[in-house]
Amino acid sequence: MFLSLEFPGGDKHVTFFARDLAGDDGFDLSRHSFSDWDSDRSRADRAVQAANRELGAKPFNYFSMLFNQFTWEGTTGWEYWSRDYDKVLKHALVVAQALALPLHVHNSFDGALLDAAQKAGIELDFVAAVRVANPVTREFEYTNRQLDNGEFIRLVDVVLPEGTPEVGVD
């Protein structure tokens, strides 16, 4: 599973993507097909929702406008209807932590990254992201081309502010 934060373009806001999802063969949004509880899609979607609940000031969610806008075989993507990029980054990092995976940032979000981290009290560094050697899905080849072109960085040495809740998905 490959996690990223990016602006997908068009009229879409910043989005958290989980791509190259294992256990997603035959997923069809137009049919009432439910993902296996242990599939990458199910785990990613649960982590996104759990982080939104846990980071929020009870009884409210962290984001009132968070939509699963990108849903096709091998991909799930949650669009934040917010310009509070500090909150977006914090939420995405809590999700990545819950899934025990690194978060990648597309260069479309680069301009907001460091300001968002500073505003949120997040310490981080980054390195160049590298091609995924053995992707699960054929569709991931497009993202691998983006990785080859240097369009993503991988966040490393991430330190979230003290008191940030941890989210479980298992």
Image: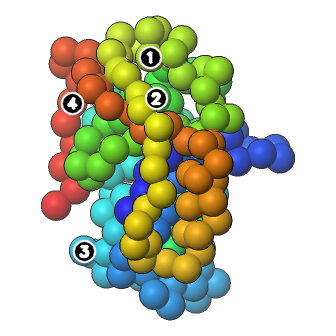
Q: What is the distance, in whole Å, between disc 2 and disc 4 at their CAs?
A: 14 Å
How many residues crowd mark 1 within 10 Å: few (<14), some (14–19), many (20+)?
Answer: many
Decide: marks 2, 4 in contact (CB < 8 A)?
A: no
Q: Dot 2 corresponds to which residue?
A: 89
Using residue 157 as the reference point, say whether residue 91 is left or right of it.
Answer: right
Between 129 and 90, which is closer to the camera in this rendering?
Answer: 129
Q: Which residue is mark 3?
A: 38
The answer to whether 78 is drawn above or below residue 80 in the figure is below
Q: Residue at x 57, y 85 (%)?
A: 28
Q: Are marks 2 and 1 in contact (CB under 8 Å)?
A: yes
Assess whether mark 3 and mark 2 are in contact (beta carbons under 8 angstroms): no
Mark 4 residue type: Pro
| Residue located 22% across and 56% down the image | 169
Give the structural element (helix, strand or loop) at label 1.
Answer: helix
Mark 1 belongs to which amino acid? Ala
In the image, taking residue 63 as reference, residue 133 lies left or right, namely left
Seen in the image, is 105 located left or right of residue 8? left
Q: Quadrant of the N terminus?
A: bottom left
Measured Cα–Cα span from mark 2 to mark 3: 26 Å
Secondary element type, mark 3:
loop
Along the polypeptide, which appears first: circle 1 or circle 3?
3
| Residue 92 % position (x, y) | 42, 38
Whole-angstrom CA distance, mark 4 to mark 1, is 17 Å
- Mark number displayed over residue 109: none
- For label 3, count other residues whose C-alpha is less than 10 Å away and answer few (under 14), some (14-19) or many (20+): few
Front residue of this view, candidates 123 and 85: 123
What label does residue 165 carry, if any?
4
N-terminal-most mark, 4 or 1: 1
Disc sitting over residue 117 in the figure: 1
- Residue 64, position in %: x, y? 53, 36
